Every structure is written in C-alpha cells, then in structure tokens.
Image (cartoon, grey):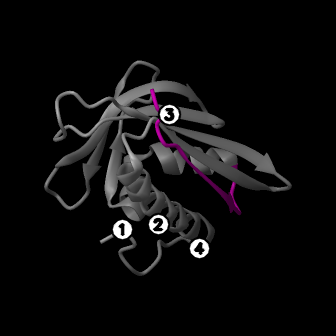
Amino acid sequence: MSQKPSFVYVTYIDSTPERVWEALTDPEITAQYWAHRNESDWQPGSRWAHVRSDGSRVTDVTGEVVEAVPPRRLVTTWYDPNGPEDQEPSRAAFDIQSYEGIVRLTVTHTDLADERAHRDVSGGWAAVLSNLKSLLETGKPLPMDLRPK
C-alpha cells in the first residue's frame, strides 16, 4: 500500500491567534478572502461546508469537524460532494501559534487522493493563505482572483 500525498504550508501573519481563528471559522470573513463561506458550528463531530459566496449556494467541499480548540487548532475532513461515491476524505489541520508577537499558521493537508490532488491543493492553499494574510494585515484581500485556473 502506498502512502497518500500530504501538503504542508507555513505562513506568518501579523495578527493574533484569536483573529486568525475567527478568520478561518467566520463565514463572512472567509467569503472575503476565499470566495467561499466556511459554515459550521465548529463543534467536533459537526458537519462543515465550503459554500460559494457568489450567491449560487453551491457546496464545493464538505466534511466533519474532527477537532476544534479555539484559538489554537482546527482539524476537518474534506470531501467533494460531487466526487465519486467511493472517495475517501482528506484531512486539513490548522495549527495557530503565537510566535514572537505574531502568528505562525501551519496548514497540513493529508490523505490526498493522488499527485493531482496534491498539485491542486498546493496552488490552492498558497493563494488562499496569501489572501488571508493580506486581509488580516491590511484590512482587504488581494485585488485579484488567485484561485488556480
């Protein structure tokens, strides 16, 4: 059995752990930098949904909240509701740490289906987290759509 690909991204944000947590879990804020609303009550075992903020209400990703320790750690499963029925969910962990007056955010996305999924999340996470950083540090997201084409 071969090991499934994983992806790790670390960024440093001039913010507080509480504000980063809020930016990851508040649907109004995620809509600003992700073009999706992350909707859930953020309790372990609860469903979460990654819903387009363009008014279509299309859910592109759904899953379960595995762990929620505000403002330090959030772990969710990721599942494509339009994907094959036999797909296995991947898992994304967000670790938020104070680091010399700023925040170190580490996103670890594991159990990716294959190398194509790894390539897709590599570009996706870089764009989303750059936009998150800009929003928290300047009050506005980057002036372009950074989603991979």
How busy is the neighbourhood of tag 3: few (under 14 within 10 Å), some, or many (20 plus)?
few
**Real-space Cα distance between discs 3 and 1?**
27 Å
Q: Position of residue 125 (x, y in %)?
A: 48, 57
Image quadrant assignment for residue 64 = top left
Residue position marked by numbered label 1 in the rendering? 147
Rendered location of residue 85, percent (x, y): 17, 29
The amino acid on which the numbered mark 2 sits, given as a three-letter code, is: Ala
Return the disc, 4 or 1, that comes first in the chain's sequence.
4
Quarter of the picture holding the N terminus: top left
Label 4: state its secondary structure: helix
Is residue 106 found inside the magenta-colored segment of the image? Answer: no
Work out whether mark 2 precedes mark 4 in sequence or the reverse, and give the earlier one.
2
Instruction: Write down the region rendered in magenta.
Output: 1-16
Cα separation between marks 3 and 4: 40 Å
Q: Tag 1 or tag 3, which sits nearer the N-term?
A: 3
**Mark seen at residue 3:** 3
Residue 38: image quadrant is top left
Q: Which numbered disc flags the more N-terminal residue, 1 or 2?
A: 2
